[in-house]
Amino acid sequence: MKKMGKRLMSVALALIMMVGIMWGRPLKAEARELLTNNVIFVVVNGAWNDGTTEDIIYPTHMWDDEDFGPTLSTDEVPAVGLKPNPGYKGGEWDIDPTSRMIRREWTFTFTYTECESATINTAPSAKELTFTGAAQELVTAGEVTNGELKYALGSSSSSEPTSGWSETVPSATDAGTYYVWYQATGDDTHSDTMAVCIAVKIKAEEKEEPTPIEEIVDVGGDEDNDDDEDSDDHGPKEEVTVSVSPFAEFITETVELIRKAPKNSTVVIRTSSWLSFNRVIMEEIAKRPDVTVEIHFLEKGHKGKRYKVTIPKGTDTIALLDKKGYTGFLFLGKKFGLTSDNQ
């Protein structure tokens, strides 16, 4: 019994000695690694509130033995929502950046929302046109809400114009095919519609057999230029019928007739093809303030009722030209009076 007790005592002392030896040894520390996890912020259809559009990379850190990663505060998230592209408005994050613990790389995307587009209530439509020698609008204007309707002339039906867009309906003079593009451009809270093309054709004139130019009819012109220029009497008439084609010949012959007219005479122009004078003719009339010009024409250029309009001598004809450099006979009729011509 005594031997058993001594033996147990010896074992206890040995254990105490071993623990003491181990306790006195220095403990070896395990290495810790600091991890970096990037947060990437992306903006779509607009910009950050400071006007930039580049992705923003924000690094976060944590120890490799930590169970929980850091979270972002509101101040660590880029300010956004005030700089949408045209046609877009305030948007939202795909994931709230402040709602996630960052234990790996994260990408958060803010996308601005596309606005509803402007509405085309009445689409523009092509006009049926025939060459008249004057500029003509190519389409009937349309109507939109929440925006403006804009037009541009293109080179084809498949290539949208990159410039020349305007609210003015395009016009053209020469016979041929024209490609009129249109789209509704939205206001601040609406986006643009897709551009659409309309092909419009100005048909060539329906030609009649040319009537030879008549000889000048001199009914007693004042060769000595002794007439009173302020007299109400238009003086002698120098008359010609001009119905030849093309328009260039009409211009040349009309200019020549005005240029050679006796002083204080009346020049009579008869045409069955044309509905306007161009700048060249109007400038020639302006050079002859002593001459009265009497025009006989068909209301539709080559058919319809025949009318007569007179440009009084001394008229500032340059002021009567439109933006394209033409003056229509019907326009002159509204200004100076239009009478039926049964001749």
Image (cartoon, rainbow, N blue to C red):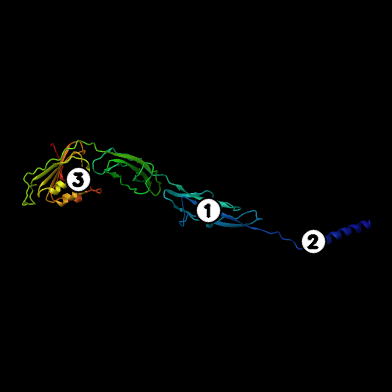
Q: Which residue is drawn at 34% across and 40% down?
A: 198
Q: Does residue 17 show up?
A: yes
Q: What element carries label 1?
A: strand
Residue 68 coordinates in the image, percent (x, y): 63, 54
Q: Going by the image, does 150 lie left or right of 326?
A: right
Query: From the image, which quarter does the C terminus lie in?
Result: top left
Mark number displayed over residue 41: 1
Mark number displayed over residue 251: 3
Query: From the image, which quarter does the N terminus lie in?
Result: bottom right
Mark number displayed over residue 22: 2
Label 1: few (<14), some or many (≥20) within 10 Å? some
Dot 3 or dot 2: first in sequence order is 2
Q: Going by the image, does 81 lie left or right of 198?
A: right
Q: In which quarter of the image is residue 342?
A: top left
Q: Does residue 122 show up?
A: no
Type of the residue with mark 3 = Ile
Q: Is mark 2 on a helix, strand or loop?
A: helix
Q: Is residue 24 above or below residue 82?
A: below
Query: Pointer 3 and pointer 2: residues touching (CB < 8 Å)?
Result: no
Query: Pointer 1 and pointer 2: residues touching (CB < 8 Å)?
Result: no
